[in-house]
Amino acid sequence: MAAKRKYKYNPKTLSFELQKPGWRLYLIRILVVLPVSIMVALGYYMLYTEAFKLKTPRTIRLEREYKVAKSNLELLTKQLERSEKKLEHLQVRDNNIYRNMFGMEQIPPEVRDAGFGGSNRYPHLEYSENADFLTSIALRFDKIIKKAFIQSKSFDDVERVAGQAGEVAKCIPSILPLPEDTKNFRWSGAFGYRIDPVYGGIRMHEGIDLTGAMNSPVYATGDGKIEAIKYEYNGYGRYILIDHGFGYKTRYAHLNKALVYEGQLVKRGECIGQLGSTGKSTGPHVHYEVIYMGRPVNPYNYFNNNIASDDYHAVILGGRQ
């Protein structure tokens, strides 16, 4: 129904003119109609959502988006778990195979895991509905990124050292310090626990003993640098320590004479001293040790047992050059 129109006679124009509502009327209408409209809308919303337990289209859309986001996060969590396992596998192989192969120090866990303790790194997630869940994902993701970066740098180092594989092969101690055709040659002491020939009792023997004639030449078993020449009266006697690099060192003990000097670079097969019986010794022999990453290891595992005598002497001749 159309609103009634009001007309007012204008004596000046001698006609009836349409009377327009004043601003007061508009104001009254706003002050009355607007609050009533808001109350009606709120009542409708409360009736719709609370009484009938119905959801608004916006609520339905938000819940759908929430479910999709949660599903994506759960999928991301599974992918993170797979990535963590693959990364852990790479770390184990890196430390125990690749870095070991080239005599490189292992990367300790505290280095791979460093930088994630202490202060709160994710304050922006504290007030979200799933704060703990989101924080754990963010932390795991950051850890993977950092570990992957460290692993990448490690592979770069391994690649660099692998490029020097020929040098590594020359430095690894792989021949006997005493030729087997030396006069009076005999294997006289193995690596491991044994009864001490001087003091008795079971003691760890950190090398092997090779018997030979007094003053027989003793040879460097790999390329390296003479780190020390010392004398121990109640121990090694006169001994030479060679640093081969890549984590390897060798010791030649009970020598009668040293024919090299500290700091000298030597090659595999080069004569470095003469066999003797100095220090705690019961007869002419050389006590030979291989030290890897600061720990004594069984020298026998490094010998090339297939090398013939002629080939061995060819190495010795090469060491003289």
Image: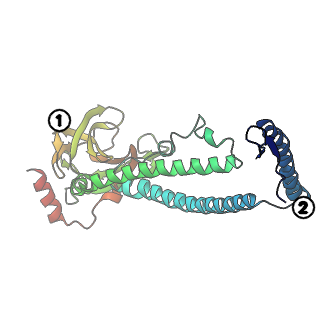
Query: Looking at this view, is 244 or 90 the one in front?
Result: 90
Mark identifier at residue 52: 2
The residue tagged with tag 1: helix, strand or loop? loop
**Residue visible at 28% across and 47% down?**
286
Name the residue at the left extreme.
321
Is 191 left, or right, of 39 in this rendering?
Answer: left
Q: Contact (CB < 8 A) between labels 2 and 1?
A: no
Three-letter code, disc 2: Phe
Q: How is the image coloured?
A: rainbow
Query: In x, y percent, where is residue 314?
Result: 12, 60
Query: In x, y percent, where is residue 299?
Result: 34, 54
Label 2 neighbourhood size at 10 Å, few (<14), some (14-19), many (20+)? few
Is 141 left, or right, of 243 in this rendering?
Answer: right
Distance of mark 2 from mark 1, alpha carbons?
97 Å
**Residue visible at 64% across and 59% down?**
69
Q: Is residue 131 visible?
A: yes
Query: In x, y percent, where is residue 239?
Result: 27, 38
Q: Is residue 298 visible?
A: no
Q: Earlier in the sequence, mark 2 or mark 1?
A: 2
Three-letter code, disc 1: Tyr
Mark identifier at residue 296: none
Q: Nearer the viewer, mark 2 or mark 1?
A: 2
Mark identifier at residue 261: 1
Query: Looking at this view, is 20 or 30 the one in front?
Result: 20
